[in-house]
Amino acid sequence: MYIEPKKSESEIREMKVRIPSDYYMKLHSLKLLTGKQISTAVTEALEMYFKEESFNDRVESET
């Protein structure tokens, strides 16, 4: 079940994750090429992923 966050819940939270080393190297390369922090690049990627119409469809079909 997917719970849509309230618009006022835009608080930033920190989370620690483990990713494969090749993903880390790609993120680090992106940081060097664009000058963006890795956290900024990950946040932008997650925002694009969760905004996709297909994300809601995938979540609903799994429940």
Image (tube, rainbow, N blue to C red):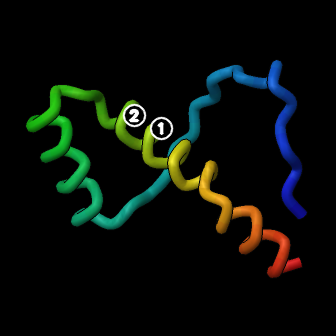
Give 8 or 52, whichever is nearer the viewer. 52
Q: Are marks 1 and 2 in contact (CB under 8 Å)?
A: yes
* Residue 6 sits above or below residue 20 on the image: above
Snapshot quadrant of residue 19 = bottom left
What residue does disc 1 label? Answer: 43
* Residue 26 sits above or below residue 62 on the image: above
In x, y percent, where is residue 38? Answer: 31, 36
User: Which corner quadrant holds the C terminus?
Assistant: bottom right
Q: Crowdedness of circle 2 by 10 Å Cα count: few (<14), some, many (20+)?
A: few
Snapshot quadrant of residue 55 = bottom right
User: Which corner quadrant holds the N terminus?
Assistant: bottom right
Give the number of the mark in front: 1 or 2: 1
Callout 2 amino acid: Ser
Farthest left residue? 33
**Secondary structure category for the residue under label 2:** helix
Farthest bottom residue? 62
In x, y percent, where is residue 9? Answer: 79, 24
Residue found at x 81% / y 80%:
62
Q: Is residue 31 left or right of residue 47?
A: left
In x, y percent, where is residue 31? Answer: 19, 36
Q: Is residue 42 left or right of residue 55?
A: left
Residue found at x 85% / y 58%:
2
Q: Is residue 7 left or right of residue 34?
A: right
Residue found at x 61% / y 57%:
52
Q: Is residue 52 left or right of residue 2?
A: left
* Residue 56 sits above or below residue 33 on the image: below
- Residue 62's disc is none
Callout 1 amino acid: Thr
Give 25 or 55, whichever is nearer the viewer. 55
Q: CA distance from mark 1 to mark 2?
A: 6 Å
What residue does disc 2 label? Answer: 39
Give 39 or 5, whichever is nearer the viewer. 5
